Image (spheres, grey):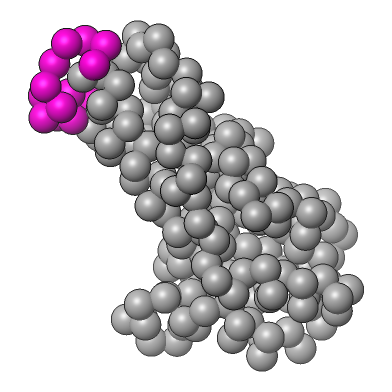
Amino acid sequence: MIKVVSFDLDDTLSDSNFDTLIWDIEIPKVYAKEKGLSLEEAKKIVIGEYDELWGKIKGDWRDASFWLKHFGLKTTWRDLLDMVKHEIKHFPEVKEVLRFLKEKGIKLIIVTSAEKKFLKAKVECEDIESFFDKTYSAPSDFNKDKKDKEVYEKVLEDFDIKANELLHVGDHKDTDFLLPKSLGIKAVLIDRNDKEGDSIKNLEELKKFLE
Ligand SMILES: [Mg+2]
């Protein structure tokens, strides 16, 4: 019997357009403006540096504030957020599904590779924050660049449940599906474009995995 349902955040609850805008457009734009470069030049430098440091700086890699500081920019996370906050969007069925699960007495959590500031901004949107008993950010709570075994094990320990009492849903085949499955956790892959076999297309379909 499922006692806790765990959600990935990006492309599971919220679309990742906001993230793409922050990383690939807004930070390069700010860089271009503050350093007096063209946007194309700034993009090359900024994105080149993301690639260069991937896997080398653990949780910091997911933190926009780290990058603003790293690039020596005056713009803050708050400034960036104000520019693109309106782009945060949850998928249409999210609230109804969260309400349904909550009414069944199931505890709800988020397990994400997103950094806490991104997570906070997203759950505050449409006030979905109140549905969740706890959230886990791999970079902020575990200093990891993506979720791994240790993160899921901490969830099982915190809620004092067996692996098969946890149901996790997410869109990343390795970290949301194969990894939790290897630990005995019930995992469901969501693919809103319906390209992956053995996946669900929206969260409504989760209801059939609850027993
Ligand atoms: Mg995701």
Instruction: Identify the residue at horizontal 21%, vertical 19% (top origin).
Output: 32
Q: How many numbered discs sit on the rendered protein?
A: 0
Which quadrant of the structure image shows residue 169? Answer: bottom right
Relative to 58, 94 lies left or right: right
The image shows residue 44 at horizontal and vertical percentages of 14, 29
x and y percentages locating residue 149 in the rendered image = 59, 54
Dominant secondary structure of the magenta stretch? helix
- Magenta stretch encompasses residue 34: yes
Q: Is residue 100 visible?
A: yes
- Residue 40, position as x, y percentages in the image: 11, 30
Horizontal and vertical percent for residue 182? 57, 69
202, above or below 143, in the image: below
Which residue does the image show at 68% across and 86% down from the upper left?
A: 207
Q: Is residue 21 magenta?
A: no
Which quarter of the rendering shows the C terminus?
bottom right
* Image quadrant where residue 186 sits: bottom right
Residue at image position (42%, 75%) is 191
Magenta stretch: give its range: 33-46
In the visual, does 137 lie left or right of 160? left
